[in-house]
Structure formats: C-alpha cells, structure tokens
C-alpha cells in the first residue's frame, strides 16, 4: 500500500486586543506553523482566515522558510482557518477534505487566548486527466464545465470551467469515489463514476464522448421557471444574503444550481465578462437541493449569475434554465 506523508499544521492561535487601533486594522493576531509529518517546516503554504457568515475581509498570508506565519484579524468573533499548498485546493473545500477538523474555527475575544490547533492534511490531491470529444467527429471539445461530486456525500462538489485546445483537462480530484459530470454548450451532459477515487499524488485518465443535443430533449425534465432573482436584478443591501427561487418541475426529485461570479459588468449590456464558479464551504451545497429555493451569501460588488435544473429520481438531469445575472451595487 502506497504511503503518503501527512502534512501537520500546528496553529498557535492567540487573540490580542488593541482597542486604540482604528477600525478594520488588525485587532487580533493568528499565528502558527505548518510542518510535514516528520516535523519539517513547509514554506510558502497559503493561510487564510475567513470571518463567520462570510461578512468582511478574509486576511491571508504565506508561511516563511521556517513554516511559520502570522496574520491579523480586524475583529473578534468566530473565524475559520484554512490552508492550501502549491496553489492546490484549500482545506476549506469539503469535496477534497470532508473532515471538518481540517478547517478549524477559532473564537477571538478580548483578553482571551486561543488553545493551539493541530490540523493533519493528507498529501496533495490527485489529478483527473479528462478528454472530452464530439461523439460523431471525435474532435476535441475545447471548452467545458466540469463538476465533480463525492458519491458518499453527493452534496460535496467542486465545479471548474476550463478551456483546452486539445480537449484534455487536468483537474484536481478526490481520493474517495466521485462522479465526474461534464457539460459543454450544445451537447448532452456526459458523466462517469470514478469508483476508487484518485489517490493522493497520482493521475487517472478518463475519456468521455458527448452527443449533440437534440431539439426535442425527449425524456428530459423541462427547465424550471425562474421566480427570483430575475435577469438584471439589482441589490443595494450590504448583507449579501441572496435567495434564489424557481417553480417546481413535475417528476423532479431534487435540483442543482450553477452559481458564478463575474470579473466585471459588460458596459451598457447588463451582463458580465468572464465568469467563474462561486463555491465556498460556508454556503449550502449547490447539488441535491430539496425544495425550490436556495439561500447563499455572495461576496463583493461584482455581478453574479445563476441557473437551475431538475434531477429525477434516477439522478438524470433535466434541461437547464438560461443564465440570470444579478448585481450588488454597494
């Protein structure tokens, strides 16, 4: 059995209050060190502290040569500490790291210290090397939306949007069983179960051929009708709690949604340029939604967009709604 070194993150967390500092300056300090299982320091690891309810800035830093770090938190309360190494997925993502011990919460209060926190991180996630081609021509499909969901916890998913001129996509994957769902505009979705997952540090190859969509979508559940937010909706609330609602689809067992943020608004068009999946561990899962609504906390003042589709009792997805764009103006 192949052995993998475990990374050991030792967070020595302390809360030191400085009431005389201006608002939004560092009032508390979170410090610690990352080492591997042999006690060797791990440099250049990214550390992030996220405030509860996703309200406010999320300070971040990197470890030094000695594996140590220190970052400032500008307010007290409950904070989640997460780690990523070599630009790979963060421990904040439950698809890769379902164990909640890998993203501890700390409470920062005036005059109170925080006990040291130890996090053991498995090695670097394995990679799925996926090739998507047209079923008829066998030509590569050069732009795809790839969604990976754990089989034992189907609410834990990771979504990526990728372009690849040769049709080959390399995406980080989970070490336990998962299903890969590939979506390409104009084609029926393709999916494949990776029954053993991808072991840490390894690469598994997968090929999928996708068929062009028929105009009738025979046998497919229809797309839900959107209630809110409708396309072009503007919000002026500072608290970015957003509720998406849609009509029920007969025959639906659950619903999935895609949620994205955009680089910027397209001037004069009310749309957005270059969108990216918006998935954070503090929001509810975007798959296997029971009911016809979904509440999430958005970030920033950039535009966002969303769409929804029904899933039948056998797990077959129905037609997707069109994209609906919304804007936070403050």
Image (cartoon, helix red, strand yellow):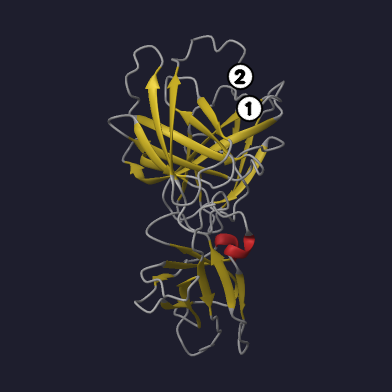
Q: State if disc 1 and disc 2 touch (CB < 8 Å).
A: yes
Residue bearing the label numbered 1: 310
Q: Residue 329: percent from the left, percent from the top?
A: 45, 52
Q: Is residue 290 toward the left or the right of residue 141 in the image? A: right
Image quarter for residue 69?
Answer: bottom left
**Toward the viewer: 127 or 230?**
127
Residue 240's place in the image compared with 220, above or below, is: below
Q: Residue furthest front?
A: 1
Q: Residue 250: percent from the left, percent from the top?
A: 71, 21
Image quarter for residue 228?
Answer: top right
Q: Of label 2 and label 1, which has the lower sequence position?
A: 2
The residue shown at (48%, 10%) is: 214
Q: Total number of numbered labels? A: 2
- Badge 1 local density, few (<14 within 10 Å), some, or many (20+)? many
Q: Is residue 277 toward the left or the right of residue 220 in the image? A: left
**Toward the viewer: 312 or 22?**
312
Residue bearing the label numbered 2: 222
**Toward the viewer: 61 or 56?**
61
Q: Residue 324: percent from the left, percent from the top?
A: 49, 34
Residue 155's place in the image compared with 47, above or below, is: above
Secondary structure found at label 2 = loop
Residue 80 visible in the snapshot: no
């Amino acid at each position: 059995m192949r052995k993998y070194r475990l990374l050991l993150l030792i967070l020595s967390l302390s809360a030191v209050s400085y009431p005389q500092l201006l608002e939004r300056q560092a009032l508390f300090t979170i410090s610690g060190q990352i080492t591997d299982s042999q006690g060797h320091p791990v440099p250049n690891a990214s550390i992030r502290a996220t405030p509860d309810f996703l309200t406010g800035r999320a300070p971040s830093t990197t470890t030094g040569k000695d594996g140590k770090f220190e970052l400032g938190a500008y307010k007290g309360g409950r904070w989640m500490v997460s780690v990523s190494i070599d630009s790979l997925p963060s421990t904040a993502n439950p698809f890769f790291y379902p164990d909640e011990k890998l993203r501890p919460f700390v409470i920062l209060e005036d005059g109170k210290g925080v006990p040291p926190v130890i996090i053991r991180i498995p090695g670097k996630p394995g990679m799925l090397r996926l090739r998507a081609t047209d079923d008829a021509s066998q030509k590569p499909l050069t732009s795809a939306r790839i969604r990976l969901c754990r089989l034992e916890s189907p609410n834990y998913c990771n979504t990526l949007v990728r372009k690849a001129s040769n049709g080959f996509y390399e995406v980080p994957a989970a070490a336990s069983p998962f299903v890969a769902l590939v979506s390409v505009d104009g084609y029926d979705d393709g999916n494949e179960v990776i029954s053993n997952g991808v072991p840490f540090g390894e690469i598994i190859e997968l090929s999928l051929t996708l068929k062009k969509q028929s105009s009738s979508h025979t046998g497919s559940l229809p797309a839900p009708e959107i209630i809110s937010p409708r396309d072009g909706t503007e919000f002026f609330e500072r608290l970015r709690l957003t509720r998406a609602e849609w009509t029920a689809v007969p025959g639906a067992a659950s619903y999935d949604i895609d949620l994205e943020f955009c680089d910027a608004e397209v001037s004069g068009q009310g749309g957005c340029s270059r969108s990216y999946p918006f998935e954070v561990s503090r929001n509810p899962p975007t798959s296997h939604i029971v009911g016809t609504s979904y509440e999430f906390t958005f970030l920033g003042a950039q535009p966002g967009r969303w769409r929804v589709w029904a899933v039948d009792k056998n797990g077959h997805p129905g037609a997707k709604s069109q994209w609906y764009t919304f804007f936070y103006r403050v």
